[in-house]
Image (spheres, rainbow, N blue to C red):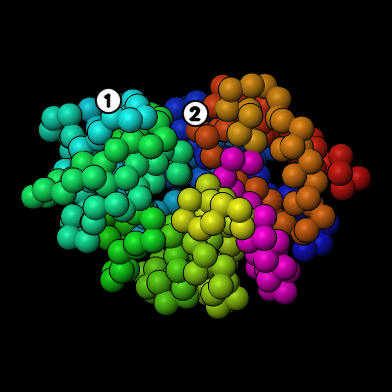
Amino acid sequence: MNQKDFYQIIATLGPAVQNQINELIHAGATGFRLNCSHLSWQELSRWLMKLENAFQNRGDAMPVWLDLQGTKTRLGKLTEPMELRQGELARFHFSYCQEDSAIPLPHQWFFNNIETGDQLLLNDGRIHLQVVQIGEQQFQAEILREGEISSFKGFMVKGKNPKFDEISDRDRSFIEQTKQLKFVGYAISYLRNENELKVFRDVVGSNPLTAKIEQEDAIKNLERIADLADSCWLCRGDLGTTANIYELYNYEKEFAKKMKHTNKLYLIAGQVLENMVNYNYPSRSEIAHLGYLIDNNFSGLVLSDETAIGKYPIQAVEFCREYFEYLVE
C-alpha cells in the first residue's frame, strides 16, 4: 500500500453521534459503518437518509458499510440490560424476545446441540459461562466471569459453530433494500471460507464487499477469501473469543503478511482506541499500536464503540487523523 493511500478511518454510527455526521467528516472520518445487528429497518433507513443529506451538502458520497450478521449468532431482544454475576445461574430459552427472567436465544441449533459442560462466551468473550443443566428448549449455565449483557450481544459455544447454509432473511432483506445505493458496501461477519463469502457476492452484485476475519479458519483461508472480497477487516474482538487469545498477535502478523501480497485494502478493527470510550485520550499502548499498523501497511482502521457509544467520538477520529498525518510526514 502506497503512503498516498493512507489512511481510512471508518467511524461506526450510533447513539453518541446521532446528529454529528458532519463533525465526524470534518474530524477525519473517510467512511462509516452501521451495525445492522442492532438496527431495525426503520432505524437503518433514518441513518441512510442522514448520510445522503450530508453527502449532498458536501458534493460527493463516502463509503458506508452495512455490517451484516452473516453466520454470527446473537442473543435475542432483552427488555432491559441484565447484570450477570459470578457464581449465579443464568437461564437461556429459545425465543427472539425476552418473556421472563430467562435470556432469549433465537437459534434452535444450539438447543439441539448443547451439552452439559459446554463453555459459553457472550459479548466478545467478556462474559464466560458453563452449561450445568439442560431442559426442553432451555438450559442453565453457571456464570464464571461476570458482566452486563443487552439485546443482540454476541453469543457462542466454544468449539461449536452452526453450519452456514444460506443468507438469513434479515440480511437478505437489508441487502435487497439498499444495494441500489452506490455508496453502500457490505461487511460480512464470521466467515470461515471463500464459499460462504461467495453466497453473499452472488446477492450483492457489484457493491463493495468486505470480509470480516474473526475466526481461525478464516485466517487459514485468507488468500482465497481476499480474492473474492474488495477488502478485509481483521476483527480482533471476536477473533480473541473464537480462537486462542494467546495467539492473537501471531494471527495479526499472519493477516498482515498474507494481505501484503494482495492488491486489496486491509484494516484493523476491535478495541482500537478502547480507552477513548470513556476518556478523551488513548492509552500509550494504543498509540504505539497505531504506529505498528502504519509500519505493516494496513489501509486503515475501524472505530466501533469509540464513536458509536463513546463519550469522545469526535476526538477519537481526530486523534487518528492527526497521528497518522504526523507519522507519514
Secondary structure under the numbered disc 1 in the rendered image: loop
Q: From what the image shows, is residue 148 above or below residue 117?
A: above
Image: 3 above or below 28: below
Q: Position of residue 101 (x, y in %)?
A: 17, 29
Residue displayed at 56% across by 32% down: 307
* Amino acid type, mark 2: Ile
What residue is pinned by disc 1? 80
Residue 222 visible here: yes
Residue closer to the observer: 160 or 134: 134
Question: For numbered disc 2, what is the local secondary structure?
Answer: loop
| Disc 1 residue type (three-letter) | Glu
Q: In which quarter of the image is the N terminus?
A: bottom right
Residue on which disc 2 sits: 309
Locate residue 205: give its quadrant: bottom left
Q: Where is residue 301 in the image (x, y as percent from the top left)?
A: 65, 48
Please tell me which residue lies in front, 145 or 251. 145
Specify the quadrant that holds the C terminus: top right
Residue 59 makes an appearance in the image: no
Residue range corresponding to the magenta coloring: 249-272
Instruction: Place residue 164 in its image quadrant.
Output: bottom left
Q: Residue 34 location, x and y as percent? A: 45, 44
